[in-house]
Image (tube, rainbow, N blue to C red):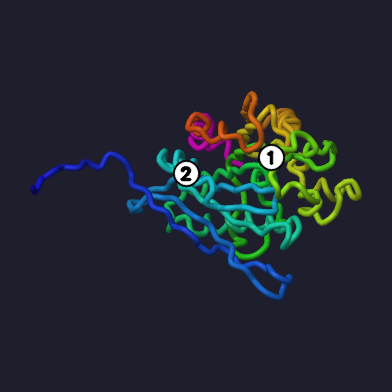
Amino acid sequence: MKKNIIVPLTDTPLTLLSGITFARVPYWFPFYDYKDLKMDLVLPFRRGGGEKRPLLVWICGGAWLTMERGAHLPWLMNFARSGYVIASVEYRLSNCSHFPSQLEDVKKGIRFLKAHAGEFGIDPEKVIIGGESAGAHLACMAGVTGDRKEFDKGEYLEQSGRVQAVIDYYGPASFTWNPKDTRVKADGEIPDFLRGPSPVNMLLGYDPADDPEKADTAAPLSYISPSAPPFFIAHGTEDVVVSIDNSEALCSVLEMNNVPVEFCAVQGAGHADPRFYQTEMADRIMGFLDGICNRREVTH
């Protein structure tokens, strides 16, 4: 039986643009073969009317050894439904290239998105970067290095790599001040891909103890200044992969530099704990970000 119904438009339908190429980088044997770096975007189904939305760039973790850019899209939909454009960005892994290639790739993604802000309905003055674990390390590095030209490689160099806020989910803040290897604890909680050579050594291409001064150039703690963007930090008190000491130290240095920071120590949570990916955590982060996105004076 035919029914005539009226369906009011009460929210903004969303769409997924998957596999957008934003850069080409040396991959197999360096400078012999090349790989396309890709990102996934979640944005309004139909864009128009000049609307500009804040952008959340998300960086997946995996010890710099593995990553899946679509892994966190279901949780990131909380932000998309609240008015953010979402970009989940790929980067080269440590078996392909050592640091700073990973940071250079993340910054390429930021510049690409700013260069195409009009096409994607992005406000280039309201860009937030976030990540978890190794992805949080890269997000923090992108946040605190701003327009430092030594990390700007590739295309769209006329665009700024600056962001207005950082979301740090249980990321390492330094590779030299906290030498204890927490991987020896709680064997059953450690993923198989961490049961081999040190992921940090593989990222850097050397043991940080052999060249601590050089290793500090890969650490967020080394770049914090009063011009750093605001931070939202969350870390589990029972994390045996990345010690919560990292986030506590990062929070302290940010506070000493008068940088706005909110630190949530999640009681009883381990590394990549499901508690980080509840709607409640997304709501906490959005409460923090909404104030930042509406205050131009905190934009660096």
Q: Is residue 32 above or below residue 209?
A: below
| Residue at the farthest left position | 1
Let me know if residue 192 appears in the view.
Answer: yes
Mark 2 vs mark 1, foreground winner is 2
Q: Which residue is mark 2?
A: 74
Residue 294 percent location from the top left of the image: 48, 35
Residue 2 percent location from the top left of the image: 9, 48
Q: Which residue is mark 1?
A: 171
Q: Residues within 10 Å of mark 1 (few under 14, many from 20)?
A: many
* Three-letter amino acid code of the residue under disc 1: Gly
Residue at horizontal 72%, vertical 73%? 31
Distance CA(mark 2)–CA(mark 1): 21 Å
Residue 100 percent location from the top left of the image: 74, 56
Q: Disc count in the image?
A: 2
161 part of magenta stretch: no
Q: Residues within 10 Å of mark 2 (few under 14, many from 20)?
A: few
**Range covered by the magenta-colored residues:** 284-300
| Along the line of sight, the residue nearer the viewer: 174 or 217 | 174
Residue at horizontal 42%, vertical 52%? 121
